[in-house]
Amino acid sequence: MKKLSKVGKPVGETIGIDVGDKVSRYCVVDAEGEVVEEGTFRNQASSIEKHFGGARRRIALEAGGQSAWIARELTGLGHEVIVANARELKWITRSDSKNDAVDARKLALLARADVRLLAPVEHRTAGQQAEIGVVRARDAILRARTLLINSARGIAKGFGVRLPKSITATFGKRALADLPAMLGPALAAVLEQIDALSHRIAGYDQQVGKLAAAHPEVQRLTSIPGVGPLTAVTFTLTLGRAERFAHSRDVAGFLGLRPRQRQSGARDPQLGISKSGDPYLRKLLVQCAHHILGHFGKDSALRQWGLAKAEGGKKATLRAIVAVARKLSVLLHHLWVTGESFKPFPQTAA
């Protein structure tokens, strides 16, 4: 297998990498688009340095679970690294002859032609990735607890027993005290595990509080009623930096809260949101929108606008919730950039 050039200036070659679980495939094309080298490397820092430790080149790879650290390793070796948005690469993802070698070659050709064809994404820094790992771990434990609670409720319901409605740190202990003796052996371990997970979630909540204190912008974002530290921290860490977006309205599209478009000639159908971007942050924003439009939401121009949109039945309400979440994403970025605090009625204040 050929080795990449170790000396000299960039020679106009571009590299495409199809990232696998343990082994990744790469393809090198020259300035004319001809393949000059193909091969594989192990997803290890030493193997990356061995194969790509030469002259500076443009390297393209798809965004994925391992793309962040691989991109950091390649950037550290002096290469120009483009992480492509897989959702925008239909030529690759929907090809009838899709395999690792072909995917790597197509990535190299796209990077050679025009970087914009790859719809590049920006990864978080290693520190930001570690911080948002706290949020991800909390969500994983929360989902595990929800699964156990639903399972316990289903088993108990088969015997006409209703478990407590409120989910507290002593949910399992209270439920176990009211269970019939015959259900004890089946549910005791599950209920004990539920309380243990609740204790772990409380620990993660404390860590989220520390992250909120470490990011000064979080205090401004939480000035919006219904937006808590978890949502504000997740928002700032997901976006990475406020300067990433030239206009606040671009954040809504980044988070998949804007309608998809399929316009062709005179045909322009109304479609649902794209649901691109981070699904967890999008879920948090929708939950905040529920609160803003709910019975306990504080009066504001945003709430009044959303309530007006919600008139017309259940479908209108669902559309209004998404619309408020979309406006909320734009507002959060605006407060982050400007350094202002939330004003319930900005026009009146002006």
Image (cartoon, grey):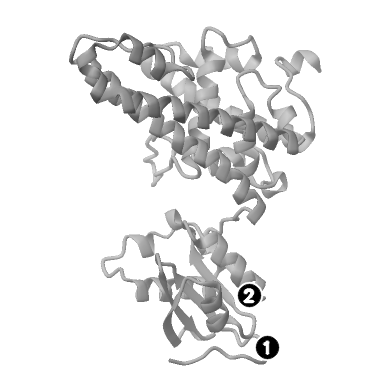
Residue 290, x across and y down, in percent:
50, 19
The residue depicted at 48 percent of the width and 83 percent of the height is 29
Residue 113, x across and y down, in percent:
52, 73
Q: Which mark is residue 101?
A: none
Q: Dividing the image into 4 quarters, which one contains the N terminus? A: bottom left
Above/below status of 297 relative to 21: above
**Which residue is at the front of the view, 254 or 190?**
190
Secondary structure of the residue carrying numbered label 2: loop
Does the image show residue 119? yes
Q: Residues within 10 Å of mark 2 (few under 14, many from 20)?
A: many
Type of amino acid under label 2 = His
Type of amino acid under label 1 = Lys
Q: Is 174 left, or right, of 228 in this rendering?
A: left
Quadrant of residue 302 within the rendered picture? top right
Quadrant of residue 25 within the rendered picture? bottom left
> Dot 1 corresponds to which residue?
9
Q: Is 162 left, or right, of 103 in this rendering?
A: left
Q: Is 174 left, or right, of 204 in this rendering?
A: left
Q: Is 75 left, or right, of 282 in this rendering?
A: right
- Distance CA(mark 1)–CA(mark 2): 12 Å
Q: Residues within 10 Å of mark 1 (few under 14, many from 20)?
A: few
Residue 304, x across and y down, in percent:
59, 12
Q: Dividing the image into 4 quarters, which one contains the C terminus? A: top right
Quadrant of residue 331 within the rendered picture? top right
Of tags 1 and 2, the one toward the viewer is 2
Q: Which mark is residue 79?
A: 2
Does the image show residue 257? no
Secondary structure of the residue carrying numbered label 1: loop
Residue 159, x across and y down, in percent:
18, 12
The residue depicted at 25 percent of the width and 10 percent of the height is 161
